[in-house]
Image: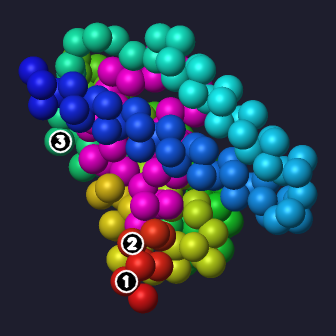
């Protein structure tokens, strides 16, 4: 029971830190580094996010994780979208759209299968990785690593952020930014 709570706290804190880092870097890029408006904006955003995480109910109290057999489709969706994006020249939005639409038909293969009904969100989560800019995700290795890491986040976040929009994109963003950080530290 304590291990589940540690995983939940780790998941929430990692997503919170990723959101703060992303918003802080966005504001820093927009304003000069010594601009007090940017510093106050960053502090205001951090305070607002902290209060939202503290007082809003983003998840259920029970500890349920997504199955690995479902989460394995996150990197598969990323690779399919990446291949359509890079090798066919369709562009990232069209590649993600095609991958998402095709994934939506998977449950039609067997309408009684609960497993097939769980696949479209996992695949669509992967499309957000596959549609990343070529400046960020420039190789199959990067896309696969980000897909696997996002798959782990996908497993851990089954009962987190229920009903909150942007969950799949946030999971994919977490995988991409984490792998980018690892690549930057290794090089």
Mark found first going from the N terminus, 3 or 2: 3
In the rendered structure, does residue 165 fall within the stretch colored magenta?
A: yes
Where is residue 127? Give x, y as percent: 50, 52
Asked if residue 116 lies left or right of residue 136, the reply is left
Q: Are marks 3 and 2 in contact (CB under 8 Å)?
A: no
Mark found first going from the N terminus, 3 or 1: 3
Residue under pointer 3: 68
The secondary element bearing badge 1 is classed as: helix
Q: CA distance from mark 3 to mark 2?
A: 23 Å
Q: CA distance from mark 1 to mark 2?
A: 6 Å
Where is residue 113? Give x, y as percent: 21, 23
Asked if residue 54 lies left or right of residue 160, the reply is right
Mark 2, Cα crowd under 10 Å, few <14 / some 14-19 / many 20+, is few
3, 73: nearer the viewer: 3
Tell me, for residue 182, which label it has, or none.
2
Q: Say which quadrant the N terminus sits in.
A: top left
170, 10: nearer the viewer: 10
Q: Up-down: is 39 above or below 136?
A: above
**Residue at x 41%, y 79% (from the top left corner):** 185
Q: Up-down: is 111 above or below 99?
A: above
* Quadrant in the picture for residue 75: bottom left
Asked if residue 16 lies left or right of residue 165, the reply is left
Mark 3, Cα crowd under 10 Å, few <14 / some 14-19 / many 20+, is few
**Residue at x 47%, y 70% (from the top left corner):** 180
Which stretch is magenta?
150-179
Can residue 34 be seen at all in this image of the molecule?
Answer: yes
Residue under pointer 1: 186
Q: Are marks 1 and 2 in contact (CB under 8 Å)?
A: yes
Q: CA distance from mark 3 to mark 1?
A: 28 Å
Q: Are marks 3 and 1 in contact (CB under 8 Å)?
A: no
The secondary element bearing badge 3 is classed as: helix
């Amino acid at each position: 029971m304590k291990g589940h709570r540690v995983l939940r706290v780790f998941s929430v804190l990692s997503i919170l830190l990723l959101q703060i880092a992303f918003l802080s870097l966005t504001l820093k890029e927009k304003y000069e580094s010594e601009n007090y408006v940017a510093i106050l904006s960053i502090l205001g955003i951090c305070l607002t996010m902290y209060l939202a995480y503290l007082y809003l109910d983003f998840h259920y109290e029970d500890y349920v994780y997504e199955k690995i057999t479902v989460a394995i489709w996150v990197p598969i969706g990323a690779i399919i979208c990446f291949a359509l994006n890079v090798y066919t020249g369709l562009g990232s939005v069209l590649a993600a759209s095609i991958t998402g639409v095709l994934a939506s038909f998977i449950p039609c293969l067997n309408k009684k299968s609960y497993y097939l009904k769980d696949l479209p969100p996992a695949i669509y989560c992967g499309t957000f990785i596959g549609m990343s800019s070529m400046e960020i995700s420039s190789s199959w290795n990067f896309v696969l690593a980000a897909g696997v890491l996002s798959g782990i986040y996908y497993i851990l976040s089954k009962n987190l952020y229920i009903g909150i929009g942007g969950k799949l994109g946030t999971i994919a963003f977490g995988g991409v930014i984490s792998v980018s950080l690892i690549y930057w530290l290794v090089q």
